[in-house]
Every structure is written in structure tokens, then in C-alpha cells.
Amino acid sequence: MRSLTGAVVGWSLVYGGLRVWWTAGHAPSFEPFGSDLVGFTGWWSVGLCGEAGVLAVALHRVRTWQPLLAAAAWGTAGALIAAAAILLPEIVGLLLLSLGPQFDPLGFASRLGCAGGAVLLALATAAYQRRTRGDCQSCCRSGRPVRWHRWAWWAAYAAVAGLVARFVVQAVAGFDGMAQGPSIIGLEVGMLLAGGLLPLALVHRWGRVWPRWVPLLAGRTIPRLLLLIPGFGLGAGLVAYFGMGLLQVASGVDSEFSLTFLLTAMSAYIVWGLGLLVASTDYHLRTRRSCVQCGR
């Protein structure tokens, strides 16, 4: 917990100091968006960095469970992720090797720094919850059994439904004018894996042990991070990116697409992301190692 607190405070000072310098009038021109962050720009971004540092210290010092403190910390981490929401299409572009001429390395690095602070604060908040809510001095787990799995099962299939709904909306609107090429095919294959295979793997047994039809790996345990990193990462990215998109649509931003198409497509993505987050949480709880002291 102490190392996490130091990491968040250090990030707050370094990244927050950079944002103070930029907000004071020394910011470069970030193309093509005009800013490296969205929603929380200018002094709002500085305030988020300072708030993250203060909350990290509070999480370290408070010895009892305080729901409002935890909610504030999770909310600040979520706001930092939302501010760096443009990372989602950029990372997808990196994976597909199709960044395009408008890619801004400095803006990308800044958004990575913002998201990194969010991850550190989230880890510190999770550590605070484990320390203050459990009854085992070793693992801090509670004696109450975890009953997430039924909800996670529905969430996983809701994520799949979100992906299907997105394709249906596009089919109704038509595919005329859409770009074609290897990168688009790769994107569609990636969507099928991340929206079909990944959610189901998080809630079914074959997501913990490689199936018999997988060469060389059949019967071996699947490394939990292989599913948890894309599950949490993509889930948070989808909710942040398309959540901010919905706010922009609600504010009346002009678009070449119809309002019905935007609302339906973005809502489908958000359902997909929320389903991944719930299913990933359940997978994390079910695949943790048993505690040596209490056996849970």
C-alpha cells in the first residue's frame, strides 16, 4: 500500500506539474484534436491530478472502511480514464499497424501518462478495500462467499449482445462508403474475438483451462492476466470512449451520422464494455490463489 501511495503521489507531482506548465500557456498544438485530453482539460486536468494525490494519501492513512472515500477514489480514476479516452482508437490503430498521418506521438504519450495515473489510483483503491473490508490479516478477504458468477454470466452475454447490436445497426444503416482493406478486416476479426470469445471465456471453464483442440496447450491452465488485462482494459476503454461520445452527442456536436445511429451504436459499445468489466471482476475473484492462512 505504501509503495502504491508513493507512486500515485509521485505521478501527481510530475504529471500534474506538466499540466500546470501547459495550462499556463506553454502547451504544444495537439493535432488533430487541439488538445491531448477530452472533457477534463486545462485547470480541470490539474485539479484531477491533485485530487488523485490527496486521495492516495487518504487511502493510506484511513484505517477503517469509508464508502465515500472509496467512491471518490474510484470516481477520480474513472475521470482520468475518461480524459484519456482517445487512447482506445489509437491503441487499436497501433495493433493494426494503421495509425495514419494525423497520429500525434506527444499527445499519445500524454494520454498514456493520464491513464497510467488512473491505473495506479485504481490499484491503491483496491488495496484499501482489501485492507479495510476483509477479516483475514493475511489476505484481507471476507468470510462472506462471493456470489458474482450468475450476474457475470448475464453480463458476459450482454457484452456479446452489444457486439451483435453494433453490427446490426451498421447493417441497417448500410455499408456504403465504409473503407475496405486489410486493416478493416483485422479490426472486424478483433471485434469478434474481443466481443464474442473474450466475454464467454471469462465465465466458462474453457477460459481457465486450454481446450483439448488447442495444439500444445491443451489441458494447461490459462494465465489469468491473459484474460484480465484485455477484459479490464478494453471494458474501461469502451465505456470511457463511447461514454464521452454520448456526452458530446447530447451537447449537440455535429456529425455526418444520424442521431439514432449514434445513440444506438454508442449504447451498444457501452453495454459491451460494462459486460466485460463485470465478467472480468468475477473472473478475477474466482481465479485468485487461495490464502495460506485462512484457506479462502
Image (cartoon, rainbow, N blue to C red):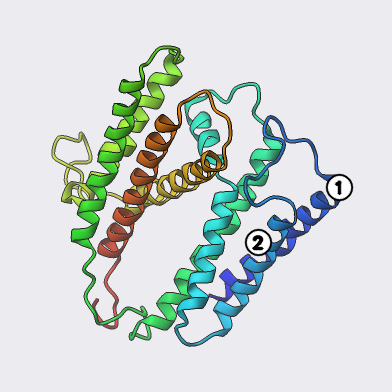
Residue 166 locus on image (x, y percent): 33, 32
Amino acid type at image mark 2:
Leu
288 vs 81: above or below: below
**What's under tag 1, amino acid-wise?**
Gly
Q: Residues within 10 Å of mark 1 (few under 14, many from 20)?
A: few
* Percent x, y of residue 271: 34, 46
Using the image as rendered, state which of residue 51 and residue 224 is in the foreground: 51
Q: Which residue is at the front of the view, 14 or 155? A: 155
In this picture, residue 269 sits left or right of residue 56: left
Residue where numbered disc 1 is placed: 25
Q: Secondary structure at mark 2?
A: helix
In this orientation, does residue 201 appear?
Answer: no
User: Quadrant location of residue 27?
Assistant: top right
Q: In which quadrant is the C terminus drawn?
A: bottom left
Where residue 130 sits: x, y (%)? Answer: 40, 76
* Residue 268 locus on image (x, y percent): 35, 39
* Residue at horizontal 20 percent and vertical 49 percent from the top: 209
Is residue 88 left or right of 154 when viewed as pictured?
right
Quarter of the image where one finds residue 50: bottom right
Residue at screen point 52% across, 34% down: 89
Q: For mark 2, what is the residue?
A: 48
**Residue 268 in the figure: left or right of residue 127:** left
